Image (tube, rainbow, N blue to C red):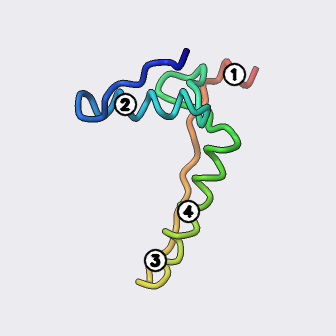
Amino acid sequence: MAAKVTSRSEDYSRWYTDVVQKTDLADYAPVRGCMVIKPYGYALWENIQQGLDRRFKATGHVNAYFPLFIPMGFLQ
């Protein structure tokens, strides 16, 4: 039996989360508010990045990357 996915018109945010989880694109991480992006999800992200990168550079903009904050306990 297929798992229920919330209707997009009913609750867009819940629908998006349902789709991402049920298609196994990402899952929740042990750090609150963070997600682990799985291989197919990451492949989609790379394709999105490539398209955005072309558009940014065409307008003279540059990319930036900011590090994640990891609790000290995870490093010990």
Snapshot quadrant of residue 49: bottom right
Q: CA distance from mark 2 to mark 1?
A: 31 Å
What residue sits right under mark 4 in the picture? 49
What residue sits right under mark 1 in the picture? 74
Give the mark, 3 or 2, whose residue is nearer the N terminus: 2
The residue lying at 64 percent from left, 23 percent from top is 72
Give the mark, 2 or 1, whose residue is nearer the N terminus: 2
The residue lying at 52 percent from left, 63 percent from top is 64
Q: Return the mark for residue 29.
A: none
What residue sits right under mark 2 in the picture? 15
- Quadrant placement of the C terminus: top right
Image-based side of 76 in relation to 62, left or right: right
Give the mark, 3 or 1, whose residue is nearer the N terminus: 3
User: Which-is-in-front pick, marks 4 and 1?
Assistant: 4
**Neighbour tally class for label 3: few under 14, some 14-19, many 20 plus, Cα within 10 Å:** few
User: Which-is-in-front pick, marks 2 and 1?
Assistant: 2
Q: Is residue 38 above or below residue 73?
A: below
Q: Return the mark for residue 55.
A: 3
Q: CA distance from mark 4 to mark 1?
A: 29 Å
